[in-house]
Amino acid sequence: MISMIVVFPKLEDAKSIRNLLVRHGYDVAAVCTQGAQVLNYADMINGGIIISGYKYPDMYYFDLKNALPPDYDMLLLASPRVCGECDDQDIIRVSMPLKVQDLMSTLEMMCASQERKRKKRKGRPRQRSEEEQKVLMEAKEVLMERNHMTEDEAHRYIQKCSMDSGNSLMETAQMVLSMVKI
């Protein structure tokens, strides 16, 4: 579930939005009245949506957006004038006075977008460090030399052993190297 942080300068407004979201089944992780509070929560939560007014005691919405980690989306709830002045394409805007259906459909769209981004990040192959690449290459070279395998065959062998044993590819490569040293 996508975590949401609500931030408005007036605590009553923030709590009203939170209550509305909770009634519609959304997870509200925090209610804040200052941008600094949002940044503290954002460091603890891994991605989500910030539902925001346009001005807080310590900063404006665009300052907060620029300070947030990249895995956060922002929904600005503000007057039509403020929404019209916002030129940041990454900030989704809903004009006040608020229509509940507009807010809910916008949040559904944003949650779907967050899920797609999350799946995309998970689907990307993990980048190995130079040291890990060196260990893997050494293990492949040992298999190529001793078992007369090609590099692809050695790599597939390490992958299969890794999957069969439930160990990571690096652990399996290190086991191959440790067996040679015995």
Image (spheres, rainbow, N blue to C red):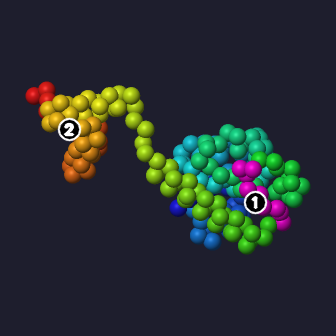
Magenta part of the protein: which range? 89-97
Callout 2: SS: loop
Q: Nearer the viewer, mark 1 or mark 2?
A: 2
Which residue of the protein is positioned furthest toward the left in this rendering? 182
Residue in the foreground of this view, choosing between 19 and 179: 179
**Residue 13: image tag:** 1
Q: Residues within 10 Å of mark 2 (few under 14, many from 20)?
A: some
- Number of marks present in the image shown: 2
The question of residue 45 being in magenta is answered with: no
Quarter of the image for residue 134 reads top left
Residue 168 picture location, percent across and down: 29, 43
Residue in the foreground of this view, choosing between 137 and 128: 137
Pointer 2: what residue?
149
Residue 30 picture location, percent across and down: 61, 54
Q: Amino acid at mark 2?
A: Met
Callout 1: SS: helix
